[in-house]
Image (cartoon, rainbow, N blue to C red):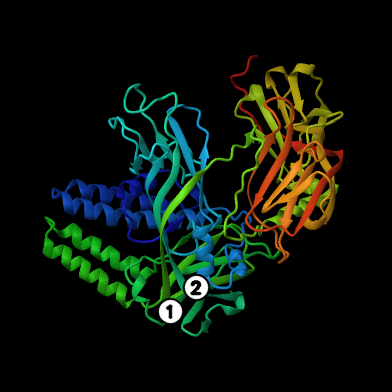
């Protein structure tokens, strides 16, 4: 939730404002509801459509800003960790080198669809960022057309049309996990320019990309001792106005004028990250980017609009001129950034756009097909002219040495009593690399559980005698389901043991010039004989000469024939592997997790008597 005026959709603003809000500050909520009602009443009285739209947009934006502030202030502070958004920059000597890698590392995959009338295309980007923007620097990516195997060029259109009888290229409407996916849609009716049994396939995707690289990025490391202080580096300055438990208020400034290339481009040059006492990065929960003075100014403008009877060109010019003049006076920028967890230290980074490099490239990308499971005997190449590192690999691989006590400490217990006939207790733990290597040969052993009543002091009392069908333990899913219909007394406690599973993992490091039988390197692809290195027992990570882990592009499995077990696994990397790390599961042990759970109270009034 990153809120910045002015917003463009008053309809969305008002819909959000009418939804339920946290009850932690009822007075502010009542005030918000009153202001919403007042705005709606004001809109009902306006006849001029242009004036009505302007009032709705600005009024809705101000109310959404207040709504967001209320939500962020009332959100419980629960620790949640994220990634270092700037880690990728340490691998590239300049911002422009990162831009070049982003553009040159982009390629397009042909994906199977469940329909004969659809072909999905997935643009694959070399970087994944967890910050609000998809890429660190201002950028634009625009798809223009797809070329088919019969030489036809199909233009891109922003949405699929029911009335268009031809082949269409549009954004995918069904894939929420890959929002950048595109779909080639073929006509549903035979005889309309397409042989549905053998339709022309996409060969290449055309488009254009623009990326703006800043002159530099500079980071300030701040703590509570820096509150009220201004830190400066050349033309960049940052002032820490306030550092609370889970949020920071920051003012920043670039004393140098913006480069002419970006003077009209909306920019957000600030990246704020926080760590807690463990030294891990906290995930962000949102930000407010307007000062009290800016909010007051826009409220004054809204009042002026509401006093008008009709919209006019002169009034529009007056409003625009006032906005430009006011914003021009705002030499310093403000941001209030919230985090999921208590803040120990801040890392405030500013992108310096006093000079900038604008990279424009026309794209004509071949559409590549790499089916996850194929019977092709030939291993096709996937070499890209970039090197990309996996900064999350070292963190993920700590799970290879996971011990019994740490596994138990990671367990969280939740309950569901909405359906008293199928009440649930669930045992979960944060997933780690160890979970990847558990395989399928589980031996959960016994999973005893007993239910107890409670005494007058709320303590555990007598056990409840139950028929076997009253409850069910699923040790592989870590759940206990129980039916209160079959309980002679109301249970208050559940006591027992739930099995957890722990892999014993052996790590080895191998030089790629001395690979053992069953492993081979073909360019940037590691080829694994899956009979000698079964997939459920082995994992492979690659490093180049820098000692950093290479990011894996994708992996496929090759069958020698359409029948029989898979023979080869092929792993493609962004870069040239110099060393391999192999991780083998050598044993699987069962860890018994003893528990005593105070049961949530269920509404049993409607259960059978």
- The quarter of the displayed image where residue 267 is located: bottom left
Near mark 2 (Cα within 10 A), the count class, few <14, some 14-19 or many ≥20, is many
Name the residue nearer the viewer: 67 or 375.
375
**609 or 403: nearer the viewer:** 403
In this picture, is 500 found above or below 12?
Answer: above
Q: In the rendered view, does 384 fall on the left or right side of 36?
A: right
What residue sits right under mark 2 in the picture?
A: 350
* Label placed on residue 254: 1
Residue 248 seen in the current view: no
Residue 510 screen position, x and y as percent: 82, 56
For the residues bearing labels 2 and 1, Cβ distance under 8 angstroms: yes
Task: Specify whether 264 is left or right of 247.
Answer: left
Residue 423: name its quadrant.
top right
In the displayed structure, 387 sits above or below 56; it is below
**CA neighbours of label 1 inside 10 A, class few (<14), some (14 to 19), many (20+):** many
| Residue in the picture at 45% in, 55% down | 70
Can residue 56 be spotted in the picture? Answer: yes
Q: Residue at x 72, y 38 (%)?
A: 568
| SS at mark 2 in the image | strand
Element on which disc 1 rests: strand
């Amino acid at each position: 939730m990153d809120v910045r005026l002015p917003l463009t959709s008053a309809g969305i603003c008002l819909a959000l404002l009418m939804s339920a809000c946290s009850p932690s500050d009822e007075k502010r909520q009542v005030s918000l509801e009153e202001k919403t009602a007042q705005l709606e009443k004001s809109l009902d009285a306006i006849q001029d459509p242009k004036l009505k739209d302007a009032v709705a947009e600005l009024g809705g934006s101000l109310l959404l800003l207040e709504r967001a502030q209320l939500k962020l202030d009332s959100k419980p502070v629960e620790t949640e960790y994220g990634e270092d958004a700037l880690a990728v920059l340490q691998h590239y000597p300049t911002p422009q080198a990162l831009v070049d890698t982003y553009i040159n590392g982009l390629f397009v995959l042909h994906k199977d669809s469940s329909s004969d009338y659809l072909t999905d295309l997935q643009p694959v980007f070399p970087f994944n960022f967890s910050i609000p923007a998809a890429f660190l620097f201002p950028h634009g990516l625009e798809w223009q057309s797809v070329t088919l195997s019969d030489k036809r060029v199909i233009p891109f259109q922003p949405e699929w049309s029911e009335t268009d009888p031809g082949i269409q290229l549009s954004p995918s409407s069904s894939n929420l996990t890959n929002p950048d996916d595109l779909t080639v849609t073929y006509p549903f009716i035979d005889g309309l320019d397409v042989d549905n049994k053998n339709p022309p396939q996409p060969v290449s995707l055309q488009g254009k990309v623009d990326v703006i690289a800043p002159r530099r990025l500079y980071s300030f490391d701040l703590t509570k001792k820096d509150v009220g202080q201004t830190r400066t580096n050349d033309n960049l300055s940052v002032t820490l106005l306030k550092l609370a438990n889970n949020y920071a208020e920051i003012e920043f400034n670039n004393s140098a004028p913006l480069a002419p290339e970006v003077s009209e481009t909306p920019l957000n040059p600030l990246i704020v990250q926080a760590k807690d006492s463990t030294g891990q990065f906290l995930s962000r929960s949102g930000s407010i980017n307007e000062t009290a003075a800016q909010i007051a100014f826009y409220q004054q403008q809204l009042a002026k609009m509401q006093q008008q009877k009709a919209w006019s060109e002169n009034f529009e010019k007056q409003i625009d001129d006032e906005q430009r003049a006011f914003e021009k006076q705002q030499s310093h920028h403000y941001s209030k950034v919230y985090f999921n967890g208590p803040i120990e230290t801040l890392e405030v980074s500013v992108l310096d756009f006093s000079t900038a490099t604008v990279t424009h490239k026309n794209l004509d990308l071949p559409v590549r097909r790499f089916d996850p499971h194929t019977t092709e005997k030939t291993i096709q190449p996937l070499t890209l002219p970039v090197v990309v590192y996996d900064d999350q690999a070292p963190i993920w691989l700590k799970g290879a040495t996971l011990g019994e006590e740490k596994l138990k400490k990671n367990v969280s217990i939740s309950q569901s009593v909405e359906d008293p006939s199928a009440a649930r207790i669930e045992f979960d733990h944060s997933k780690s690399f160890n979970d990847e290597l558990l395989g399928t040969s589980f031996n959960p052993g016994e999973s005893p559980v007993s239910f107890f009543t409670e005494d007058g002091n709320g303590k555990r009392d007598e056990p409840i005698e139950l028929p076997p069908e009253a409850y069910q333990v699923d040790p592989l899913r870590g759940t206990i389901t129980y039916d209160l219909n079959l309980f002679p007394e109301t249970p208050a406690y559940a006591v027992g043991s739930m099995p957890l599973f722990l892999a014993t993992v052996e790590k080895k490091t191998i030089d790629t010039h001395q690979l053992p039988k069953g492993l081979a390197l073909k360019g940037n692809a590691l080829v694994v004989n899956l009979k000698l290195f079964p997939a459920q027992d082995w994992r492979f990570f690659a490093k180049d000469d820098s000692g950093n882990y290479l990011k894996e592009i994708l992996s496929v499995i090759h069958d020698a024939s359409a029948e029989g077990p898979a023979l080869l696994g092929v792993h493609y990397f962004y870069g040239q592997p110099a060393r391999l790390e192999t991780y083998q599961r050598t044993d699987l042990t069962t860890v018994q997790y003893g528990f005593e759970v105070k049961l949530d109270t269920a509404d049993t009034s409607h259960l059978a008597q």
